[in-house]
Image: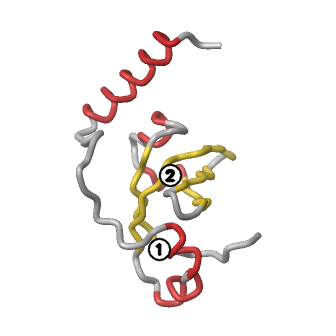
Amino acid sequence: MATLPELRAVRLEKLELLKKAGMNPYPTETLRTHSLLGVSLNFAELESTGQDVVTVGRILSLRGQGAIMFVTLFDGTEKFQAVFKKDDMGENPLLLEEGAGGWWPLSAFPKCRRFG
């Protein structure tokens, strides 16, 4: 088990990665258009219209499966699983570096049905 100083060092490294990428690690506002509960309740409508969705959530888990990555987000209203293609994440996928526990904005449009 990691010690408190080791955990702190890892978090400081992640903070520096965000800063080097030009991201504000402590944003005071976001352009969120929907809560995760709102996405869940209106999924069919959002999918049929192709409307872009911007939401924010804490990363609870990351699971890589070859060329795709499953990310479970929670924003206080709902847990939601998003799927990313690693090729579409750009050359520097900070999401992979940050890992679980971080808060991330997600901008996308719903493409597939929600199951379960």
Q: Position of residue 99 (x, y in %)?
A: 52, 37
Q: Tell whether label 2 touches label 1 (CB within 8 Å).
A: no
Q: Is residue 45 visible?
A: yes
Residue 82, above or below 35:
above
Is the residue marked by circle 2 packed among few (<14), some (14-19), or many (20+) residues within 10 Å? Answer: few
On residue 72, the disc is none
Amino acid found under the numbered disc labelled 2:
Asp
Q: Which residue is mark 1?
A: 109
Q: Which residue is mark 2?
A: 87
Amino acid found under the numbered disc labelled 1:
Phe
Q: Is residue 14 left or right of residue 66?
A: left
Q: Position of residue 41 (x, y in %)?
A: 58, 80
Q: Is residue 115 left or right of residue 18?
A: right
Q: Position of residue 109 (x, y in %)?
A: 47, 74
Give the secondary structure at mark 1: loop
Front residue of this view, candidates 110 and 8: 8
Residue in the image at 28% along x and 41% along y: 26
Q: Position of residue 37 (x, y in %)?
A: 54, 71
Residue in the image at 30% along x and 26% along y: 16
Residue in the image at 55% along x and 54% along y: 73
Front residue of this view, candidates 74 and 13: 74
Give the secondary structure at mark 2: helix
Q: Is residue 27 left or right of residue 42?
A: left
